[in-house]
Amino acid sequence: MARFYFLLCILLCTFHLFAAEQAAEITAYAYNNAVLEIHSASAPYEIDNAVVFTAPATARFTGIAFDFEGYQTIHPFHIHTMHDMDGNKTDSILFYILNRPPHIHTISYRLVIDGLWTTDPLNPDTYYDEETGILLSRFTFNTQMIPTTTSLAQQSTAQIDSSTVRFVYRGQSGQKIYLAGSFTNWDPWIYELTETARGFYEIQLPFAPGTYYYNFFSGMNALPDTSNSKRVYTQDGRTASVITVK
């Protein structure tokens, strides 16, 4: 029974982290694996097409800002809580996973810890930037960029096999996005999409052959499927996207 509660706790924790702010184009599988590999606070390290930054869970807030964004955006760290086999908490680590930006081999960055700018105390690679007059931390990738076969930006709502449709919505991160249509009698609370990457939501559903009308919903607000240009006006006056399953 203790093992069951331990596994349940891990699954709930993983789902929360999975829905949190993630680097675009990290798959849910790779992201969760990267989180599970975190066992202690350490210098940043490379995994697949990403870099993992960690920090002790002692500050009220820890964030990170990068040179390729002009240090204008502060990305908050998330918390990874570890448990023993009996489900008891053993430790907590703060982390941020950054998907490797295209064509970048070295990243400069700064941390914000409880409102104060600082270098990364766990990273020995620190240098003085004469242009800005500040100390910066630096991370250099050891590998070449691993190509991805399909970018998330290219993915769209489509039939993916003889009886399955994959619905795709792109928008702001951290939303609750639902799917409704003629197959749910327009009930907007039945199917919730999963945020598998930052701002990228998806769900796969089985369908019999036929033509279906649908929209995405945030609360009661209908959202268009921008990845599907096929739309109609329904008899009740709404604009709906259309997909035909063959």
Image (cartoon, helix red, strand yellow):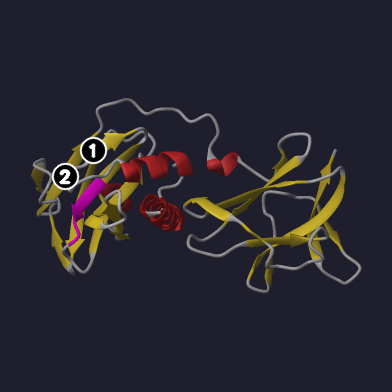
Can see residue 160?
Answer: yes
Label 1 sits on what residue type? Tyr
Q: In the picture, which quadrant includes the N terminus?
A: bottom left
Pointer 2 residue: 42
Residue 45, disc: 1
Can see residue 25?
Answer: no
Q: Residue at x 19, y 47 (%)?
A: 40
**Depth order, front residue of 186/156:** 186
Q: Main secondary structure of the magenta part?
A: strand
Measured in 3D between alpha carbons, the distance from the residue under mark 2 to the one under mark 1, in whole angstroms, is 8 Å
Q: In the picture, which quadrant includes the C terminus?
A: top right
Image label count: 2
Q: Secondary structure at mark 2?
A: loop
Whether the residues at callouts 2 and 1 have beta carbons within 8 Å, the answer is yes
Image: magenta residue range: 53-57
Q: Position of residue 15 (x, y in %)?
A: 45, 55
Q: Position of residue 211 (x, y in %)?
A: 87, 49
Label 2 sits on what residue type? Ser
Residue 55 colored in magenta in the image? yes
**Depth order, front residue of 51/36:** 36
In the rendered view, does 170 fall on the left or right side of 31? Answer: right
